[in-house]
Image: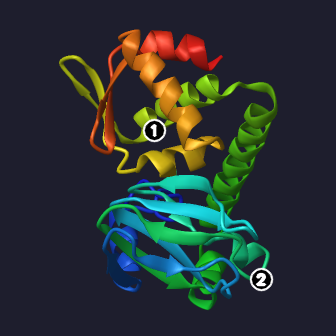
Amino acid sequence: MRKAPLFSPLDEAAAESLIATMSSSRLERGDILFHEGDQGDRLYVIGEGKIKLGRTSSDGRENLLAILGPGEMFGELSLFDPGPRTATATAVAETQLVSMGHEQLKEFLAQRPGVALTLLSALARRLRRTNDVLADLVFTDVPGRVAKALLDLAGRFGRPVDEGVMVAHDLTQEELAQLVGASRETVNKALADFASRGWLRLEARAVLLLDVERLKRRAR
């Protein structure tokens, strides 16, 4: 949690003092923290687990915008641009969070302008990442997007093992397809092709990456 932009500029004592003033909550897999359209009034930081942010179309189809894990924060956008939540936040694993109301956050940032700059930098990185995702939807085929998504998940949630990199993403096949922005059938076909080439091995809500370099080349 200390690597979150809200805490990283602070020394250990200041960070612990701030965390002590925040509200703590725990979610089970499938629990919804807030819905798209709810009034946004809190910033959240993940201590353990994973949260998916998704939007639902008028015909009921869901698109995943992001999968967030320990040390990542969300909900800060409404601090700078007040309004309803732009996505639904759902736990995809048992998750522990701390949160802070916007009024408390504003008072804190007024006393710590350096933290405000760090938050703005985090928002800029998220915007850049969103632009990259939009470009991929236009210019990259589905297998390339699958490879890129797996590498991104590996960089954030993977752990080295003897055979490669184990990525416990906690996503169903449908959720992984929503993250890529393609049908489940098309994504499963790409995964099966990668597995047949010896690039990865599929596990239950996890994947073992056996040939990261090949996946990197396919993601380009």
| Placement of 188 over or under 37, stated as above or below | above
Q: Is residue 218 left or right of residue 141?
A: left
> Which residue corresponds to mark 2?
83
x then y, percent, for residue 135: 79, 34
Mark 1: few, some, or many residues within 10 Å (few <14, many ≥20)?
some
**Picture residue at 65% right of the left edge, 69% below the top:** 87
Q: Is residue 199 visible?
A: no
| Placement of 212 over or under 8, stated as above or below | above
Q: Secondary structure at mark 2?
A: loop
x then y, percent, for residue 192: 43, 23
**Residue 112 sits in quarter:** bottom right
Q: Is residue 180 visible?
A: yes
| Contact between labelled residues 2 and 1, with CB atoms less than 8 Å apart | no
x then y, percent, for residue 92: 39, 61
Name the foreground residue: 148 vs 103. Answer: 148
**Residue 63 sits in quarter:** bottom right
> Which residue corresponds to mark 1?
153
**Picture residue at 46% right of the left edge, 26% below the top:** 191
**Picture residue at 47% right of the left edge, 17% below the top:** 193
| Quadrant housing the C terminus | top right
